Amino acid sequence: MPTHLISSAVFVATISVMSLTSVHAEFKLSTFETDVTIPIGHRCMGVLPTKSKSIADPLEARGFVLLGSGKPIVVIAVDWCEIRNGAYDQWREAIAAATGTSRERVLVTSLHQHDAPVTDAGAAQLLRDVGLADELYDENFHQQTVATVAHAARESLVRAVPVTHVGTGEARVNMIASNRRVVLEDGRVSFGRGSSSGGDAFHSKAALGEIDPFVKTISFWNEETPIAALSVYATHPMSRYGEGKVSADFVGLARRRRQLDLPNVTQIYASGCSGDITAGKFNDRSDQAREQLITRLYEGMKAAWQNTKKQPIKNIAFRSTPLELEFYQHGDLEPEKLKAALEDANLRTEDRILAAMGLSSHQRVAAGQPIDFPCVDFGDTQLLLFPGEAFVGYQLMAQQMNPDRFVVSMGYGECWPGYIPMNSSFGDGFHDKWLWVPVGSENRVQAALQRLLTPQ
């Protein structure tokens, strides 16, 4: 394989702030990419009954290390479905050790393709204890992959080059994103417009709903030479899934097409806050629809690059605030019920896996470990990493808080919360098995955002 592929809430008031303000400081950037494709026979999306049968195209981890603003800052986007709880710590700790930084300064985001793995060390341990070792994910493969990515990040440091300017550009993406929320003919609200609902006449004709139509690109330059580009767009990244065909799907394929355009500029893509955003209005699972999605996203990324404006980097500040979200202990998520489900050998393995994931998240919250909610601040440009499947409303909220700045929001950081709906979505009756946080989470996230975006 080619080298470029292989290689009323209670808040914690403390906020850690690290910054460098000297305009004479020399910033540097290194980039890295590695193959993270799962083996044949590996489970996808944590609970899909069909395990991987073939590799349609590889899964990659792509990232950069930013030097010169105190300890290194690492941003890495992974073609996996979710990285949760202890596994999320494992990724960040290994990369932090490899690059000489601290865990909270490593921003790991999953793109959330469904024909890709979910990892959760706590859930894996719980499953191992009931005789279901490696059912959620292959733990040895995971360990090796984390080590490989950390090694790639470390090795990239010797290739670090000066970065003098940051570029920002955005462009409208047409006919991809649509909100899952639709109003049925009888007036009831449904969140049933999934990723491939376009074959249904009602869902294809229903209004777009609330979306963020823009792909945003942050680029890094050494004077006039571009080094790397990070593009972010809010949509679930699936054209189709569940057949055992491992793929980075249309977002990964669009990213690779952009890489061919600019071979010397590392292309990184991350999914925005898109828990309630899919391509369902425009996608019917067909090959033609998938190709159209690839092309539309590619054209958006290309246009965002063409619209880029550069500014000298005078200051880079890193901030991280702890975000405490409650565990949603409704009837089905009562710990004792989850434990009983995990231990019930008569249940489907997939149901027992889901119970283990819920228990792992409950243990995480009970232990008092908050979510690290980070921001990399370039002055007029801010890069955020939201946890879980945050709804697009959070991304729009961040932009509204700082309307005069270029605010880029990645989703799918620490993924144990699953969906993070807005309070209004709970009011509309949103509920899902992949939901581990209750109504009121919006209030907690909003307060954390205010601390991140408008520090005192």
Image: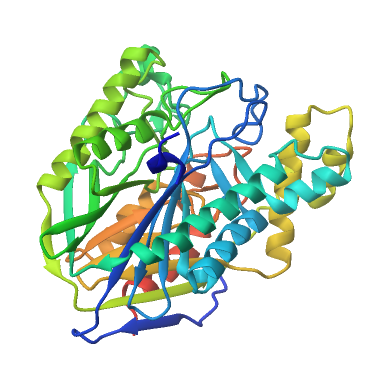
Q: Position of residue 158 (x, y in %)?
A: 38, 66
Q: Is 450 on the left-hand or right-hand side of 438?
A: left
The residue closer to the viewer here, 10 or 241, is 241
Residue positioned 37% across, 75% down in the render? 318
Q: Quadrant of the N terminus?
A: top left
**Relative to residue 93, is residue 148 depicted above or below?**
above
Q: Position of residue 35 (x, y in %)?
A: 49, 41
Q: Quadrant of the C terminus?
A: bottom left
**Relative to residue 99, is residue 76 depicted above or below?**
above
The residue closer to the viewer here, 186 or 383, is 383
Q: How is the image coloured?
A: rainbow
The image shows a total of numbered marks equal to 0
Q: Position of residue 316 (x, y in %)?
A: 29, 75
Q: Position of residue 269 (x, y in %)?
A: 34, 45
Residue 452 lies in what quarter of the image?
Answer: bottom left
Q: Is 185 on the left-hand or right-hand side of 313?
A: right
Residue positioned 40% across, 36% down in the render? 2
Residue positioned 38% across, 15% down in the render? 284
Q: Is 456 on the left-hand or right-hand side of 173?
A: right
Residue 45 visible to the viewer? yes
Residue positioned 38% across, 25% down in the render? 280
The residue closer to the viewer here, 322 or 102, is 102
Residue 323 visible to the viewer? no
**Relative to residue 203, is residue 406 depicted above or below?**
below
Residue 367 lies in what quarter of the image?
Answer: bottom right
